[in-house]
Image (spheres, helix red, strand yellow):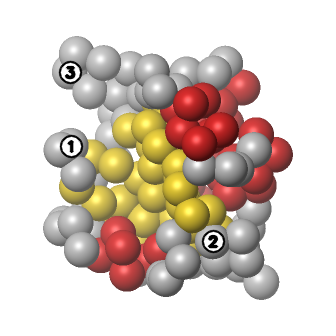
Amino acid sequence: MDTWPAWDETREWSKRWVSWLLTTIINDWRTERVSRDFFAKLQDRRFNRQQVWTAITSPESYIGRYWYAGNRVGFWHPRSRLFIAWKPNGLYSSSRIMTGFYYHSDGVAYMQKFVPFREIRGPKR
């Protein structure tokens, strides 16, 4: 499955697309497919690899799609307040984790500022 899913009419993406997304971002993280300065940001912004892993794999994380100079998927882990942004494959670049930062307010509200916004998965408790 190498094509990006189209926006749909339902509140959340299908389990199949969420599974594809999670498999892809986990693979990107394990192979360190990240932006050029991601590890510097990790150090400067005082979060660690385990926190990134938790944000992208936790069922508590809210996942949304938004536009920020291209398609982005945000992972907002409300307990830690860590936000991780991922970029899917593009015409001239491969997918990769772009940035991470603590967002002391609501990470969902942050994503909603960048339209079009679409919820992919709400937190599972």
* Mark 1 neighbour class, 10 Å CA radius: few under 14, some 14 to 19, many 20 or more: few
* Residue at the image point whose x is 75% and y is 62% from the top: 58
* Residue at the image point whose x is 72% and y is 26% from the top: 30
Does residue 92 appear left or right of residue 26 in this picture?
left
**Label 3 amino acid?**
Leu
Label 1 residue SS: loop
Please identify the quadrant where the C terminus is shown: bottom right
Label 3 residue SS: loop
Instruction: Name the spot of residue 26 as percent of width and height, x first.
Output: 67, 36
Instruction: Name the spot of residue 119 as percent of width and height, x first.
Output: 40, 72
Mark whose residue sits in front, 1 or 2: 2
| Picture quadrant where residue 90 is located | top left
Asked whether residue 72 is in view, the answer is yes
Does residue 15 appear left or right of residue 72 in this picture?
right
Marked residue nearer the N-terminal end (2 or 3): 2
**Label 2 amino acid?**
Arg
> Residue 70 shows which numbered tag?
1
> Residue 81 shows which numbered tag?
2
Mark whose residue sits in front, 3 or 1: 1
Marked residue nearer the N-terminal end (1 or 2): 1
* Depicted 114 relative to depicted 52: above or below: below
Query: Is disc 3 in contact with disc 1, using a CB cutoff of under 8 Å?
Result: no
Marked residue nearer the N-terminal end (3 or 1): 1
Name, please, the residue furthest toward the front: 44
> Residue 91 shows which numbered tag?
3
Does residue 43 appear left or right of residue 120 in this picture?
right
Does residue 5 appear left or right of residue 74 in this picture?
left
**How far separated are the C-alphas under marks 3 and 1?**
11 Å
* Residue at the image point whose x is 30% and y is 18% from the top: 93
Label 2 residue SS: loop
* Residue at the image point whose x is 46% and y is 58% from the top: 74
Instruction: Name the spot of residue 23 as percent of width and height, x first.
Output: 64, 38
